[in-house]
Every structure is written in structure tokens, then in C-alpha cells.
Image: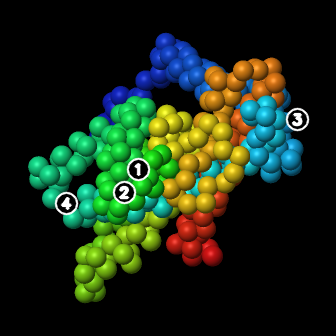
Amino acid sequence: MTGRVLEAAPRALPRAPSGRRWDLGFTVLTGLAALFIVLMVAVIVGNIVWFGWRTVTWEFLTAAPKHGMTAGGVFPAIFGTVALVLLMIVALIPVGVGAAVYLSEYAPPHSPFTRVVRFAVNNLAGVPSIVYGLFGLGFFVQFLGRGLDRALGLDVVWGQPALMWAALTLALLNLPVVIVTAEEALRSVPREMREASIGLGATRWQTVRHVLLPQAMPGILTGAILSVSRGAGEVAPIMFTGAAYFLPYLPQLPTDQFMELGYHIFVMATQSPDVDATRPILYGTVLVLLLLTLLLNLAAILLRSRLRARLTGRA
């Protein structure tokens, strides 16, 4: 009886040839799309390297611009870019991670306030960068900076475009990225670890500080890496809040203006009186910006890998 039942069971039908053709065609199309992206990146980077590597010398990396930026180097712009990114990270990570901890661990999921916060984060992610620049000029420079000058009885110290205001504007620009990545990293921590910590008598804050944040730190650093890439290349938010056209010296205080590689490229590409004379410097500056962004990202990636290895017990 059992044998008859097994014999009567229907066999799996082979896939139709048309289905195989659709699978093959979809595989080819997606592969071509991925190849097209790789080729575009290779063409762009190859073009920059081909026209810029001769310009990038030791003098170019360590000297200040001269003769209306048709000679000299880009060291003040390199210094300003690194200082801008570091100040942005210092201002961005505590606020972004704090908001993510609140949304993930403290906020009631269905409360109106939580919905308003998430709505604000989603809308901030879609605001054009030039709007952030105008907001930074109006709020940080004119309202907050000049308000501090009036309150402290100063002439013009805080109420002018400065490195600090540009960093805060970029931090606000990258805030949604850090909040989303940090919240996802916190949610990825197994629930059993939370329950074990609370079961041992730890408070919620102790659980967040000693269990959740160390486990989520690699994911949080992922948001920081994305912020570094975007912050180092943005021009619109810093045009009105601190970047200067030509400053052949280094900023000494957070209230000083500064040169930045992205803005330096923009000025040479659009405002140069002699395009032929500045073209080699332009390509060299773009190559330096790419290499600097790569180095900053590499440092953050190495730190993230180190933390992951420590958490998994390999270091």
C-alpha cells in the first residue's frame, strides 16, 4: 500500500525553458549594471590620477598657495579639511549616538513625541546641502555667534564665519546618517544580552553603557565613516559658514576662517582668471582630496576592525 502511494505521488516538474531564459537574462542585466558602475568609477579615478599625479609633489603638499592660486601648494587646505572633519566628528557622534540610544532604548515606540523625532530625522536626510549652509549662516553665525558677542561685550569674535560654525553645520548635515546607523547597530545587539544584564541587577543606563554601546560600536563607526566621506567633500554648507577663498596661513582658533580642499577646487574651477595655469593644480588638488578621504576612511575602518576583533576575542 505504501509503495502504491509513493508511486502515485507527483514528481517535481522540471523548470520551463522560458523560466531559465528569464533567469539568465536577469543575471546578465544585473551583472552589466554592476560592471557599468565599476567602469564609471575606474574612468573617473583614472582620469584624475592621470592628469594629477605629476602635480602632487612634496612641495605641493607642504606649501601654501601663491600668485592667486596659480602656484604653490595646498597645505592650508589640507589642514583645514582635516580640522573640519575632526571637529565635525567630535560634535556629531555624541549627539547622534545619544539620539539613537533614546529612540532605541528609552522612547515609547508609539508615542507622538517619538513619531515626531523620527519624522524630523527622515526629513533632515532629504534637505539639500545648500539649505544647511544658509541655515548655518543664519543660526550659527548671525543668531548664535552675534548673540554671544553682544552678551560678552565683544566686537566681532563669534559672529563671523569660522571653522567651528562650519563643523557644526556639517554635523547637522550628517546627523540623520549617524542616528539611523547607530540605532540599527543597537537593535542588532541580541535581546538576551539586555535581559542578562538587567537580570544581574544592572540599571538601564549601566546596560546601555557597558553592554549595548560596546557591542554596537562597530556599527556606530560605520555611520562615522559615511559622515567622513560626505563631510570632506561637501562645499555648499561651508561656503557661507567658514571657508575662505584665499588664506595662505593656518587657522589658530575655532573662530578663524580656513581653507578647505573642496571649496579650493570649486574656486579654481569657476573663478580662476587663467584656466590653463590652474588646471594641473586643480587635478592635483582633486587627487589629494580623494587620497585624504581614503586615508580618513581607512583609519576609521581599521579602528572598527580592531573593535570587532576585540569583541570576538581575536585580539
Marks 1/2 in contact by CB < 8 Å: the verdict is yes
Image check: 222 left or right of 140?
A: right
Q: Earlier in the sequence, mark 4 or mark 3?
A: 3
Of badges 4 and 1, the one in the foreground is: 1
- Residue located farthest toward the top when viewing the structure as drawn: 18
Q: In the image, which disc is placed on residue 277?
A: none
Q: How far apart are marks 1 and 2 (CA)?
A: 7 Å
Marks 4/1 in contact by CB < 8 Å: the verdict is no
Q: Residue 146 in the image: x percent, y percent?
A: 35, 51
Q: Earlier in the sequence, mark 1 or mark 3?
A: 3
Q: In the image, which disc is placed on residue 54?
A: 3
Q: Tell me which amino acid carries mark 3.
A: Arg
Q: Tell me which amino acid carries mark 4.
A: Ala
The residue that label 1 is drawn on is 159
Q: How far apart are marks 4 and 3 (CA)?
A: 55 Å
Of badges 2 and 4, the one in the foreground is: 2
